[in-house]
Image (cartoon, rainbow, N blue to C red):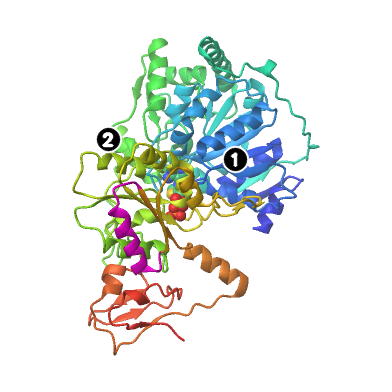
Amino acid sequence: MKHMGTMLMRKGPFEEIVMGNTALVRAMVEVGTRVVTSYPGSPTPEIATAIQSIPQEDRSFYFEFSINEKVATEVAFGAAINGYLSTVFFKSVGLNVASDTFVQLSLMNIIGGMVVVLGDDPGANSSQNEQDNRHFAHMSYTPMLEPSNPTEVYAFYKEAARLSREYRMPVILRLTTHVCHAKEKVAFSVFTPMPQDDTSRFDVANGPYIPLTTEALIKKRKAIRKLAEIETVADDSALNLLIDNQNRNRGIVTMGLPYLSLMDVLEKASRKPDILKIGFVHPIPRKRIEAFVRSHDEVKILEELDNVLEKDIKSLAYDAGLKTRILGKGDLGAWIGEYTSDKVQDVLADTWPDMFPVRNPEPELPEMVLGRPPQMCPGCGHRSAFHAIKKVLSSQDITVADIGCHTLGYLPPYEMGQVMMCMGASPGIGSGLSLFNHSRKVVVFLGDSTFFHAGLPGILNAVFNQHPITLILMENGTTAMTGHQDHAAVGQNFNGPTNKVPVRQVLEGLGVKHIYEVDTYQQSKLAERVKTAVSNSEFSVVIARHPCMLKFTRNARRKSGYQAKQVHIDQELCNQVHVCVASFGCPTFTRHKDGTVTINRDLCIGDGSCLQTCPSQAIQKPK
Ligand SMILES: Cc1ncc(C[n+]2csc(CCOP(=O)(O)OP(=O)(O)O)c2C)c(N)n1
């Protein structure tokens, strides 16, 4: 980590093998970005890890994890209209949360420049959907660049920053999971530290910054004009790449990861199409594309997810009266998933079977390799909570999940969480489910980071409109799912200690009258509290608290060489009723064919939350 931090601030030119996410931070340093904000979400959290590796006193910019993506965007915007180059980064669906602010950005005169880094997630590797944020560039009149590898991430960020400063408008740098996480040797340039100029440059004369009715239309016109100017930049840009394989019959227009995979596929091909790889996704380099399409008989548009580029290119070909056959998305499969080399081979085999052979079917996995479902960690307080709560709910009751580690409660053996949408949606969905519903209790779950991120309005609505649901707030003291980022109740932010905003006081402030607090390891007490809460005819909250044990044990090991007091099974006492395996479900327990249960010494963290689950007290802890 320390090495990474030193490397990122090195003055001389150097080469290093880095991830796309790390290359991005070096680019921020070189171009003098002053303010960076984010809310965590895959595939972008390693950008913050790279930032964190730079000691705070050496860091050339301010960074914060904001409360959510919308606020992060607003902080970066505020800094940019005060004259500082800023950047906000977050995951694909983060843009949905940020969108009310985001769609205004291109209408504003962003004097300092602002780069919006999006981590899209084709294949929905760690997202609730697979959305193509290129659509947002179109609907918000915002330029968008898309790199294919870490070297390009570095170069494209610099170009995005340059354009944004020059045109005083936001520029989106769209990354995808593969590009964020790929590693390669990148040649970095010189970093010349600039004297830190803290002059506040905000001036209404640069505005107006109030987009009331008439202004809104003037601003829209300006944004569209700026986009037209940027189109000429796109046409001349070195971010586009032409590979002339002397094939005037067939060409491919592509971008991003599909380009990399295409190069992989072509290594084995005897005949190769010409290739135009574009770096500008919006606005597209129209003239270059038009010339390329015009000079080929057939052009395949190779793009991941939706047919965004295809529609753009078909429309320009129509306007230019081109006769070229343009081949877009084929069957449904081409619209879904990451464009890995195999996928590109399949897509091209569908398009030009004479040129790209159909792949042999995947070999069957040997039977020995078992599927491994996702599960909560050993000692997770969420497991204790679900195990206890399940006992007091009837099979008729309705449970609503939210996003976080506790989502896994929907899996057997707990099966709690029958509906889920997006961060912070559970109180609202639960409220709807409680209408005209007199017989079934509605219980909704919410994590503590999500509580602050987007949970508050739904809770306030439940209070305001008197929805008689029960919220179980799964408070583990961190944003566990995305790598333990701090949140407002922790007393610590990215840059140091800060005031705690206790969840209970926030709830009281929102007018919640029935609040119960309990440590989730106290399973009987928790069950009791939940029973009381759900029997209430008003909105109630149970704060089910236990620190994230992955974070706790990691910290404890780092500090004091923590030795887990692992549990053992007294085989004499064990009645083999298997509550530990079948209902509690800690992965530490292994049930053998003869019915005996043993402890996996690699997994047990010695938390002891399982002791109370055994009816015959066969699970024991060393004294
Ligand atoms: C809009 C949005 N931003 C970010 C994410 C990524 N993400 C998934 S879960 C989560 C937060 C989980 O923290 P918390 O609510 O405290 O639950 P925990 O994982 O700690 O149980 C985040 C930020 C997302 N899915 N959606």
Pointers 2 and 1 in contact (CB under 8 A)? no
Percent across and percent down for residue 318 are: 37, 13
| Residue in view at x 30 percent, y 65 percent | 370
Depth check: 519 or 172 in front?
A: 519
For label 1, count other residues whose C-alpha is less than 10 Å away and answer few (under 14), some (14-19) or many (20+): many
Task: Identify which amino acid the numbered label 2 is placed on.
Answer: Leu
In the picture provided, is 618 more to the left or to the right than 576?
right
Using the rendered image of the protein, determine whether residue 323 is visible from the camera's viewpoint.
yes
Query: Which is more foreground, mark 2 or mark 1?
Result: 1
Q: Residue furthest right?
A: 195
What residue does disc 2 label? 332
Q: In this view, does 200 lie above or below 432?
A: above
The stretch in magenta equals 520-539
From this viewpoint, is residue 352 visible?
no
SS at mark 1 in the image: strand
Where 269 sits versus 226, above or below? below
* Magenta span contains residue 327: no
The residue tagged 1 is 37
Q: Look at the numbered disc 2 and give the secondary structure of its residue.
A: helix
Which comes before the other along the chain, label 2 or label 1?
A: 1
Viewer-proximal residue among 132 and 579:
579
Magenta-colored stretch includes residue 536: yes
| Residue type, numbered disc 1 | Thr
Quarter location, residue 1: bottom right
Query: x and y percent of residue 596 in the render?
Result: 27, 82
Q: At 22% across and 82% down in the image, what residue appears?
A: 594
